[in-house]
């Protein structure tokens, strides 16, 4: 059984790719207001997910970095 049940199932790369697609679709226009709002909301979710993965990566790097306590 995995201890990481709080981890999202979407990878950073998947979320970033979908977010880029959402941005392209919004920029292309031609959508109804409801479609635009739904895409915007999905984009916000994806941006939050990407930020989660970046924060986790920073935490891992910080934990792996040597400390300068010798001195």
Image (cartoon, rainbow, N blue to C red):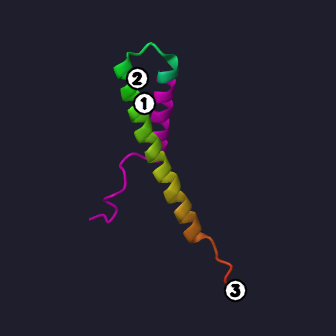
**What x and y, as percent, mark residue 66?**
64, 75
Residue at position x 53%, y 58% from top?
Answer: 57
Badge 2 local density, few (<14 within 10 Å), some, or many (20+)? some
Tell me the quadrant of the picture where the C terminus can be found. bottom right
**Circle 3 — which element?**
loop
Residue 14 in the magenta stretch? The answer is yes
Which residue appears farthest toward the right when viewing the image? Answer: 71
Q: Name the residue under label 2.
A: 36
Left or right: residue 66 versus residue 28 is: right
Q: Name the residue under label 3.
A: 70
> Range of the magenta residues?
1-25
Badge 1 local density, few (<14 within 10 Å), some, or many (20+)? some
Q: Name the residue under label 1.
A: 40
**What x and y, as percent, mark residue 27?**
52, 21
Q: Mark 3 to mark 2: distance in Å?
A: 55 Å
Which residue appears farthest toward the left when viewing the image? Answer: 1
In this rendering, the answer to whether 54 lies above or below 61 is above
**What x and y, as percent, mark residue 67?**
64, 77
**What x and y, as percent, mark residue 13?**
49, 43
Are the residues at dot 1 and dot 3 in contact (C-beta closer than 8 Å)? Answer: no
The mark nearer the N terminus, 3 or 2, is 2
Count the marks: how many?
Answer: 3
Residue 9 in the magenta stretch? The answer is yes
The mark nearer the N terminus, 1 or 3, is 1
Are the residues at dot 2 and dot 1 in contact (C-beta closer than 8 Å)? Answer: yes
In this rendering, the answer to whether 61 lies above or below 7 is below
In this rendering, the answer to whether 45 lies above or below 5 is above
Judged by depth in the image, the label closer to the viewer, 1 or 3, is: 1
In this rendering, the answer to whether 18 lies above or below 35 is below
Residue at position x 51%, y 17% from top?
Answer: 28
Residue at position x 47%, y 22% from top?
Answer: 25
């Amino acid at each position: 059984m995995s201890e990481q049940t709080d981890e999202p199932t979407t990878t950073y790369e998947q979320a970033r790719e979908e977010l880029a697609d959402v941005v392209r679709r919004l920029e292309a226009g031609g959508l109804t207001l409801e479609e635009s709002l739904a895409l915007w909301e999905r984009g916000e979710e994806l941006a939050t997910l990407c930020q989660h993965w970046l924060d986790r990566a920073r935490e891992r790097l910080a934990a792996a970095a040597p400390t300068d306590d010798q001195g």
